[in-house]
Image (cartoon, rainbow, N blue to C red):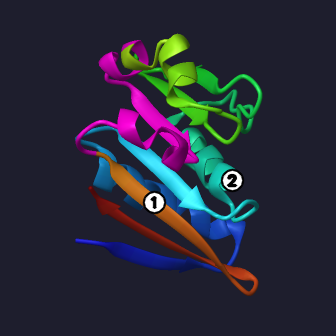
Amino acid sequence: MPNSVVSHSTEDLSSIAADILEAGKNDKVIVFTGDLGSGKTTLIGNICKFLGADDYQGSPTFSLVNEYELNNGMGIFHFDCYRIRNEVEMLDIGWEDYLAKKNWVFIEWPEKVKNLLPEHFLWVNIKVEGDNRRIDWKML
């Protein structure tokens, strides 16, 4: 069942982060789509902070992946695939190993690696509507 909410400010993102994590807790792979500048990285940052990643560093645009350890022994892998030229690049950095660890996996620009996505994941789309953001999510 899809969910949808309108965010009027960044103060809304903490509760939205909780709802998204609840929806994605079984598979722990969440992909984020939306236009450049729509707020994907900002939302992921709020989700990481909600999970307890105190050292969130922003989007891994050039490194492709940022890793964060959580106090509960789990971790977060945040991928930014914007600069990926082909899916082989993802395989070369150990994509399958990252997925096998069963940590949280957040992926920006998933359309660049669509053939590598797991069978089930939570899809989150952000759409700019004036000064607000419409955030939709559903399991795929």
Where on the picture, by quarter, is residue 53? top right
Residue 88 or residue 49, whichever sits in front:
88
Residue 94 drawn above or below residue 139: above
- Mark 2, Cα crowd under 10 Å, few <14 / some 14-19 / many 20+, is some
Where is mark 1, residue-wise? 124
Mark 1 falls on what kind of element?
A: strand
For image coordinates 50% across by 39% down, the residue present is: 106
- Rendering coords of residue 112 (x, y %): 54, 43
In magenta, the rendered stretch is: 97-120
Residue 101: within the magenta? yes
- In contact (CB < 8 Å): disc 1 and disc 2: no
Residue 17: within the magenta? no
Where is mark 2, residue-wise? 42
Q: Is residue 27 visible?
A: yes
For marks 1 and 2 on the same chain, the one whose residue lies earlier in the sequence: 2
Where on the picture, by quarter, is residue 120? top left
- Mark 1, Cα crowd under 10 Å, few <14 / some 14-19 / many 20+, is many
Q: Is residue 15 left or right of residue 103?
A: right
